[in-house]
Amino acid sequence: MATWVIQSNKIKTSQTLLLIEALSRLGEPFVDVAVDTETGLLTEVPEELGTDLIPYGSTYLVKVAQQLGWRHLFFDEEKFNVAAWLKNRPDMLNADAKISTIAAVRRDIGPLLMMHPVDLFIRPTRDLKDFAGHVIKTDEFARWADRLAVGDCEFDDTLEIAVSVVKPIQMEWRYFIVDGQIVTGSVYRHGGQPLRQRELDGEVLAEAQTMADIWLPHPCCCMDLALCGGELRVVEFNGLNASGFYDHDVEAFAKAVSAYCRL
């Protein structure tokens, strides 16, 4: 039986407590690990557990799981990438995204944007995020890129990013998918404002499943959808092992993942 490895610090404890409580009710085995605040290293996982492990925590834990060969890391670096999504999905919210380095955007697009300011959405192309995707104004982008050029962050201006114009979004959902099937979903934003509300509408869930059936970067993943201009679009995909919960059915999530890992 696979054992869950849950990171108990450096992430929101509300997330891990929900999962720990669900696993306890289900009788699924788990261990807590922590990132040492001084060394930045992960506390050791008992050797007797081997590699039959399911990590849940930060992207740092995902990287550790990669290095140690844990079996139940649902991740493919080539497919959890904006370029792969644009190639395989015709329905991405930011289908117009330009992929380039921060330095190149600053050099080639910056002057034009200063003449015609717009709000931009920027994010790293990779899933193991060096920074979280966010909206940024043209002049803020220029100042941010300047700071990177002098080493003001943990990454530099050679980082590959996707840049797109901000879209008007009516509602956003997060769905957890296991073996290609939606297990639980939640609204997380409505009209630009945070809203945590479990999705229970059968028609909405069926439409989301239709979206999941098109293409996924992995049979087990997290899919964020948005309603934009009356059409459902894919915002992004995230690795299931490091995606946060909103008003999700965490017990259904834990049960489905545990069962999948016993196949």
Image: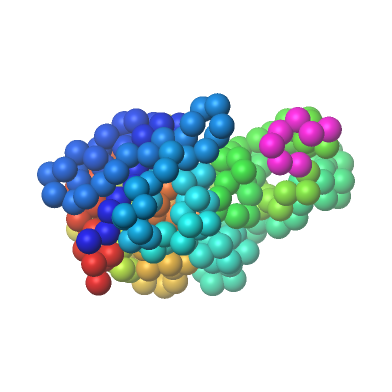
Q: Position of residue 152 (x, y in %)?
A: 75, 30
Outermost residue toward the front? 48
Could you tell whether 129 is left or right of 12 in the image?
Answer: right
142 w.r.t. 171: above or below: above
Q: Quadrant of the C terminus?
A: bottom left
Dominant secondary-structure state across the stretch colored magenta: loop
What residue do we see at 13% from left, 49% from top? Answer: 27
Q: Is residue 197 highlighted in magenta?
A: no
Could you tell whether 23 is left or right of 165 in the image?
Answer: left
Q: Position of residue 249 (x, y in %)?
A: 22, 46
Q: Position of residue 135 (x, y in %)?
A: 61, 38
Outermost residue toward the top? 38
Front residue (pair 203, 223): 223
Front residue (pair 239, 230): 239
Q: Which residues are magenta?
A: 150-156
Could you tell whether 122 is left or right of 250 in the image?
Answer: right
Whether residue 51 is visible: yes
Q: Position of residue 245 (x, y in %)?
A: 33, 42
What residue do we see at 42% from left, 43% from top? Answer: 44
Q: Which quadrant of the structure image shows residue 113?
A: top right
Q: Quadrant of the N terminus?
A: bottom left
Q: How is the image coloured?
A: rainbow
Whether residue 11 is visible: no
What residue do we see at 82% from left, 46% from top? Answer: 103
What residue do we see at 27% from left, 59% from top? Answer: 2
47 w.r.t. 206: above or below: above
Count of numbered circles on the image: 0
